């Protein structure tokens, strides 16, 4: 028995997991940890899909060494993926995203820049957890996730660089439905948190 995956599977399945964990935060807010991790994984994979080109050299460090290996000039190096925020910088670059006639680059905003930086910070702290007591205010998580989702929407539906081969339109329709469900659930959570803050702030005389 084998567990098989690829960059498309990672992008899609991680987004489905993000939805699952968002739903589960209603019962246990600890699931926000898994929301952050799965959304980070999905965002990274979709950025890779949008940037990789035909030989995936655009998303790795030291592509020249790999290219030399392809032409038999040296042994294959140990490949490593560009770090998350470098991939994000690349999807905002015309030069990096200009892979075909329909390609578009992502025009980032202060909000999306901050969201990706915070997503990466939270994910890294969760993954590389140093012994400590850590209290996290979760009220801002729905907006953070919404801002990141807007980037994924661009990559999937507008960048012109993300393809799903023979079932491209079917897969994109499914992803559109999934993203709508995620946004709806994030709105519900945001309203719950706002209501909770209002109630906690109320102090009867």
Image (spheres, helix red, strand yellow):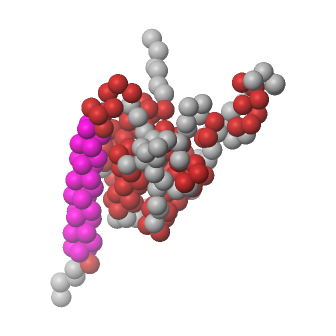
Residue 26 seen: no
Relative placement, left or right, of 200 versus 98 is: left
Instruction: Identify the residue at image location x=24%, y=49%.
Output: 180
Q: Quadrant of the N terminus?
A: top left
Looking at the image, the residue that sits furthest to the bottom is 205
Instruction: State whether residue 190 is above or below residue 200.
Output: above
| Start-end of magenta stretch | 173-200
**Which one is nearer the viewer's eye here, 138 or 103?**
103
Residue 120 in magenta stretch: no
Instruction: Identify the residue at image location x=61%, y=47%.
Output: 83
Image x and y of residue 136, in percent: 44, 61
Looking at the image, the residue that sits furthest to the front is 101
Residue 98 seen: yes
Looking at the image, the residue that sits furthest to the right is 73
Image x and y of residue 189, in percent: 25, 58
The majority secondary structure of the magenta stretch comes to helix
Relative placement, left or right, of 141 versus 192 is: right
Instruction: Identify the residue at image location x=69%, y=41%.
Output: 61
**Which one is nearer the viewer's eye here, 199 or 17?**
17
Image x and y of residue 24, in percent: 28, 45
Instruction: Identify the residue at image location x=25%, y=38%.
Output: 173
Instruction: State whether residue 143 is above or below residue 88.
Output: below
């Amino acid at each position: 028995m084998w567990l098989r995956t690829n960059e498309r599977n990672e992008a899609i399945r991680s987004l489905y997991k993000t939805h699952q964990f968002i739903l589960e935060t209603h019962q246990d807010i600890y699931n926000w940890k898994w929301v952050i991790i799965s959304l980070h994984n999905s965002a990274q994979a979709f950025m890779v899909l949008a940037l990789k080109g035909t030989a995936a050299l655009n998303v790795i460090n030291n592509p020249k060494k790999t290219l030399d290996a392809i032409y038999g000039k040296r042994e294959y190096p140990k490949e490593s993926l560009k770090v998350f925020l470098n991939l994000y910088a690349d999807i905002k670059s015309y030069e990096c995203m200009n892979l075909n006639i329909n390609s578009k680059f992502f025009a980032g905003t202060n909000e999306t820049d901050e969201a990706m930086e915070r997503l990466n910070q939270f994910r890294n702290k969760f993954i590389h957890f140093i012994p400590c007591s850590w209290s996290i205010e979760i009220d801002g998580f729905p907006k953070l996730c919404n801002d990141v989702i807007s980037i994924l929407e661009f990559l999937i539906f507008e960048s012109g660089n993300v393809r799903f081969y023979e079932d491209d339109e079917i897969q994109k329709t499914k992803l559109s439905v999934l993203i709508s469900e995620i946004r709806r659930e994030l709105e519900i959570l945001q309203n719950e948190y706002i209501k909770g803050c209002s109630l906690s702030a109320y102090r009867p005389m």
